[in-house]
Each structure stands twice: as C-alpha cells, then as structure tokens.
Amino acid sequence: MMKSFIILALVITIAAASETNSENEKCEAASVFYDKCNKCRCANDGNGAVCTRKQCIPGEYDGDGVLIKPHHEINKRSVCIDYPDLPEGNCEFGKTYRKDCNTCFCGKMGVTACTMKECGADVVYYSRKSRSANENWGPRYNQGDLCEPGKKFFSECNECHCNTDSKSAICTLKMCPPHQE
C-alpha cells in the first residue's frame, strides 16, 4: 500500500509539472531559467521546459526572474487569492484549492497534490469557510496502533489514511496547535 501511495504521489507530481511544459518553445538543453517568479528547467533535448507553478505577484519580477522592487515595497495583501476549500473526494482537474494554510492542485485523475507547509495557530487562513483549530482533531496515532484499513482519521490535527495491514498509516506531518477542549 505504501509503495502504491508513493507511486501515485510521483504520478501526480509529474502530471502537475507536465501541465507547465512549454513544448513549442526551444531553450538551452538542461539549462535552468526563470519565468517571472517560477523556476524552469529545460529538457535535455532543448525542446520545452518544466516550470514551477507559483502565483507570481504582478510587478514583482521581470521576465528574467529578477526582483523589480524590494519585498517591503510590494503590497502583497492586495493580491491575496481566495481559493475554494479542498472538496472531499475528487476535485476538478486543473483547479487550485486551499486546505488550511496549504495550496493544492488537482491532477488529471481528480486527485490533489498539496504543499505541506507547517500550519500553526498563528497562521491566518484565507478560506471561504471559517475553520476552528479543533474542527478535525483526533487522538495521537503511533505506528503500530490498530486502525481500520482504508479509513481516514485524524492524529491530532494531521489527516491519516490507514493501510491495509491495519497496523500502519500514512499521515500528514503538520505541527499541530495546542488542542483546546
């Protein structure tokens, strides 16, 4: 099960990265360059490139990735994007979602790949629905504890998925804020 999860994560990452591929553009083989704030790597044959998919702040970088203004001069609050919350189950291909303080991208098979930022109590979530720090909370899970195969559960604030052996789980690794009853 763990091997399948790792392979699935790799496929999602490659699928998400391939969406940024500029197949018709030529570049210096195996070179690294910037497209605004996004880092790109040219293919080994010089035909196309794969780039990160950061949301660049308008007017912050020139086309070569050079910072135009110092960060303290840019009003980042004016470009905050309110992505919709990540839906349960499948998502819509190509859409971007928010899960707590993380950004998620929906791949071709309706499965998301999300950033894994540390989300703490001091983080302001830009979300369409309010979330309490204790909304999804469960008892701390330790590998080897029994769980129901295939079921989702929470270990403190981390989302876990129980493996088929019922003795191990795959969990996010967020730092959880102090739990308040």
Image (spheres, helix red, strand yellow):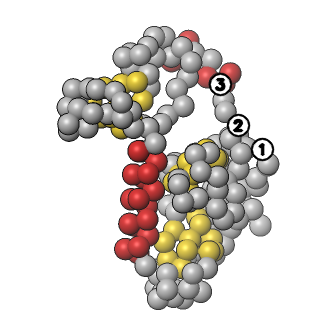
Image mark for residue 30: none
The residue nearer to you, when weighing 90 against 169, is 90
The residue nearer to you, when weighing 180 against 143, is 143
Tell me what residue is drawn at x 70 percent, y 50 percent: 85
Q: Are marks 2 and 1 in contact (CB under 8 Å)?
A: yes
Mark 1 = which residue? 128
Mark 3 = which residue? 79
Q: Position of residue 146 (x, y in %)?
A: 54, 88
Q: Quadrant of residue 160?
A: bottom right
Q: Position of residue 163 (x, y in %)?
A: 49, 81
Mark 3 residue type: Val
Mark 2 = which residue? 82
Q: Are marks 3 and 2 in contact (CB under 8 Å)?
A: no
Tell me what residue is drawn at x 69 percent, y 63 percent: 88
Mark 2 residue type: Asp
Label 2 secondary element? loop
Tell me what residue is drawn at x 43 percent, y 13 percent: 62
Mark 1 residue type: Arg
Q: Quadrant of residue 45?
A: top left
Q: CA distance from mark 3 to mark 2?
A: 9 Å
Q: Is residue 17 left or right of residue 119?
A: left
